[in-house]
Image (cartoon, rainbow, N blue to C red):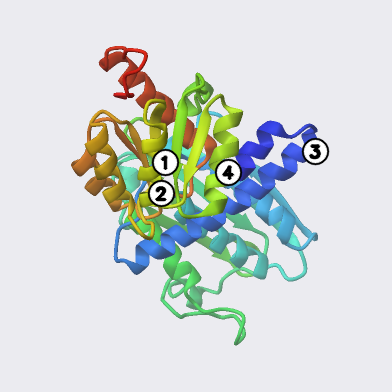
Amino acid sequence: MSCDYLADTAASPQDRELIQVLGASARRGADIVQQLLLYGRGSTVPRSPLDLGRVIKDMIQIVRETFPKDLAVSFHLPDDLWMVNSDRTQLHQVLLNLCVNARDAMPRGGSLSLHAENQQLDTAASGLHADAKPGPYVVVHVQDTGEGISPEHLDRIFDPFFTTKPVGQGTGLGLASVLGIVRSHGGFIAVASKVGAGSRFSIYFPACDSVALPSATEAKSPARGGKNELVLVIDDEASIRATLLNALQHHGYRVVCASDGADGVAVYEQHAPNVHIVISDLMMPVMDGQLAIRTLRGLNPNLPVVAMSGVPTQRQEVERSFGPHLRFIQKPFTVDQVLTPLRELLDEIEKSVPPRANNEPARW
């Protein structure tokens, strides 16, 4: 969120580019942490339609920045590449494992290429591959000019803990995890390799039912700013309060802040005639977010609230308890991800609640 705010205020293209790199790195780190938490809780990883081409471009940038310079890296992506229903971090994990293996197979340099294509498999074509079903697929080919895989090892490369690398250079879990992720998507993998002539891994991901990519305007609609409304921000983390304060003020809102639920109720009572909306964390000391929202709704039943939390399972609970005029956003989030529900709620309330008299407390 801080990177989004800084990018909006940066003066030079060079500064904006550096800030975008910082933001992308932070998002990758947050995605990895989120996936570890989901696995640790025994939850399934949530998936949504993704542009696999963007993930491949991101991976190409990582490879070019971190792999040895004697590796020539190339990629090819069609403009009409279909969408896949997936998790971005899992796709990163698949591609990174394959690219690292390709790098290790070329200790004296070589060529690494990634390219993707749309394929419609009929019954005959799907019968050539184990685990394949007829239908539309997005296929990613990761090809190298390395040492290749010997025939006696080819059937074992996806076995957990199997590795031909020296001790300390491989766990034998990379390709096993790749296979597990691809199969969990309903996809499959085809491998072709020849000793001394390199290897090609072809990863087949089922395409979304709606295979058309959204237009640029649909992919990211511009965030809508404020109309000088007063926003109460409640969060026990000072950095989040400060960032929200700066971002919201920059986009046309007035802001007052509170450090926990009890403080939030007190601040609301001080500014009740003027507060239009509340943004509240759910996990806080002294008084948690749910109790704070319940107390604030007791004072103003129509009060719109944007609830935020790093625990995605809290969404259903708060939506069930405070459904009307409530939105949930999961931490970490971008500036656009908080501005959009904020504006939606304010517009929703403005249409549903009659105007108030001059001295009447805010009913929205």
Give the residue number, with chain letter if any, for mark 3.
Answer: 14
- Tell me which label, 1 or 4, sits earlier in the chain: 4
Q: Nearest the camera: 80 or 45? A: 45
The quadrant of the picture occupied by the N terminus is: top right
Q: Nearest the camera: 179 or 192? A: 179
Image coords of residue 270 (percent x, y): 41, 36
Three-letter amino acid code of the residue under disc 3: Gln
Disc sitting over residue 263 in the figure: 2
Q: Residue at x 56, y 29 (%)?
A: 79
- Tell me which label, 4 or 2, sits earlier in the chain: 4
SS category of the residue bearing label 2? helix
SS category of the residue bearing label 4? helix
Image coords of residue 94 (percent x, y): 49, 58
Give the residue number, with chain letter if any, for mark 1.
Answer: 267
The residue mark sitting in front, 4 or 2, is: 2
The residue mark sitting in front, 1 or 3, is: 1
Three-letter amino acid code of the residue under disc 2: Asp
Three-letter amino acid code of the residue under disc 4: Thr
Q: How would you rate the neighbour count of disc 3 (Cα within 10 Å): few for under 14, some for 14-19, many for 20 or more?
A: few
Quadrant of res 62: bottom right
